Amino acid sequence: MADTTHGGSDSGTRRDFINLLVNTTAVFGAAAVAWPIISSLNPSQDVLALSSIEVDLAQIEVGQAITVKWRGKPVFIRRRTPEEIKSAEDVDVTTLRDPQPDSVRVQKPEWLILVGVCTHLGCVPQGQKPSEPRGQFGGWFCPCHGSEYDTSGRIRRGPAPLNLAVPTYVFETDTLVKIG
Amino acid sequence: MAAPVFKNPVIRWIDHRLPIFSYLHHEAYEYPTPKNLNYWWNFGSLAGFMLVVMIVTGLILAMQYTPHVDYAFNSVERIMRDVNWGWLLRYLHMNGASMFFVVVYIHIFRGLYFGSYKAPRELLWQLGVLIYLLMMATAFMGYVLPWGQMSFWGATVITNLFSAIPVIGDSIVTMLWGGFSVDNPTLNRLFVLHFLLPFVILAVVVVHIMALHRFGSNNPLGIDTKGPQDTIPFHPYYTVKDMFGLGIFMMFYAFWVFWAPNALGDPVNYELANPLSTPEHIVPEWYYLPFYAILRSIPDKLTGVLAMGASIIVLFFLPWLDRSPVRAGTYRPIFKWFFWMLVFDCVILMFCGKYPPESYWMPFAGEIVDATTFTERVAELQGIPHDQALNAVGEMWGVNAAGGSFGIKIVRLGQLGTLYYFAYFLIVLPLLSIFETPRQVPLSISKPVLGGGKATAHATAKSMEKA
């Protein structure tokens, strides 16, 4: 017993050292156990494998909009009319809550592609169909809390803090777009 | 025993209102434990550890599993292939069941040898048997969930056990199934119960520990602790000893999980359940084999099921079947032999449960062969025509020792095993209680630990001073 408890007063005893080793091992052990458990809660490989889709745009008329599902969420694809493009480009960017010129939100001005999820609390805004309200700015209107988006999907009025998000996409041909 | 004074003011504040820290201090820290516990006493805490592992991995798996006949099998395969670390979690859970039973069987046999079921620990023992029963039910239900061939046919066979009940048996089975065969409603309810029962087990474990702490652990000498000189505080002595045992055990566990994850399971269960075709061989998991052998030993359906049930129920009555006042087998010269024969008997029964009942075990040839092959062997080795050999085999109920062709029908061996199993509890133990003369047990735990003999009084006094 004497050997294990005697040691320099500032260096600690051998028992302190053993305790330190045991506790350190326990911490690493717990981390090694927690890692796979927590990691298993993240998206699995089959979910990640479905993270991109291809959409054929050939059937969409000018002024028409379609909604497709990507990663479980709606994506709005709207073929804008020249008037809508003009009104989106003419806005004074400095007056916006989330200032972004229309040019950075589209790859081809005619095709506006947005994640159709309101940046306030996640509802799907209305305005895809001609019969639905589009709000004062001609874009989308969120029925949950009244956020209004313009023809570039930018937030103009209501509680939402940010513009509708633009997903990653590429035009594989003129009429085929790959989202994600 | 005085309430501890905690340095941390937050703990002190809480403890004053909710004395949970005092309670833990009392039950897990200063808790006086016999100082002579050997490593067989590690298995209780290991069983507790396994219960936690099974609940944690089970919860995570349940988040990924789909209890539906069309999706269950694929959702398990998805866990294996697509879910991050899913293979590890499933293998931990799957092999964890086996590890849980390994640990619990050792725990039970430790209790049987050292007489831990005797007064005043009868309830403690019975609660343990209850936990074991719940474990068997839970493990069976869990085995059904992957919806492989063995899952399905295991579920069919086990639920059909209830059809042995006269008159109402068939209605009960239909009710258990929620239909006319094992199907989607069955899978759904088994999943729900598989989720629920572990928490019931947890609750019974808490009561088991309450009963344990009433009189404290039994010990290898099987005698009561006589005072502080016979005990040491649970922490750090047994927490450290348990942790050391846990480290060794986890290596054993990890061996199965990482090197032989499917060795304990049946490969047929990686085939999707098919209600139209039964696999050639229905074999339960290894931990049920002895009971399966008892079931098959008896050629009558109802009696077979009753015998299997009785093999567990008899454990509930054990404290009153063994009336010997001496707990530890160490001091019971005759009991000891019968005890080790029981261990051996359970291994034999396990062996019998594994192989088809109609096959023959040829111990000298080291082979298990079917009836036709056995008859041919007998004919060949004894140089007699085939039809005579057939007769000889039939007449000798499968035992034919002449000419080195000794073989015993698996079902006969199982019957002998079953006979001994019940005889041990119902005949041997009651008789031993009367006729056996136990050896002298030590006067106290301190005595043998500190060298015994003439030094006893002196040594006891000395350790009293320390305490």
Image (cartoon, coloured by chain):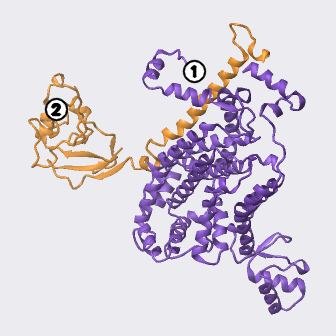
Chain colours: A orange, B purple
- Give residue B385's quadrant in the image: bottom right
Please identify the quadrant where the N terminus of chain B is shown: top right
Reading the image, the residue beneath label 2 is A89
Q: Amino acid at mark 1?
A: Ala
Q: Which residue is mark 1?
A: B2
Three-letter code, disc 2: Glu
Q: Position of residue B333 (x, y in %)?
A: 84, 52
Vertical order, A114 against B289 (above or below): above
Camera-nearest residue between B420 and B326: B326
2 or 1: mark nearer the eye: 1
**Residue A106 vs residue B197, the one in the foreground:** B197
- SS for callout 2: helix
> Seen from this angle, which residue lies furthest front?
B434
Provide the secondary structure element on which disc 1 rests. loop
Point out which mark residue B192 bears: none
Q: Residue B50, how many percent across, how many down?
A: 59, 44
Q: Nearer the viewer, residue A23 or A80?
A: A23
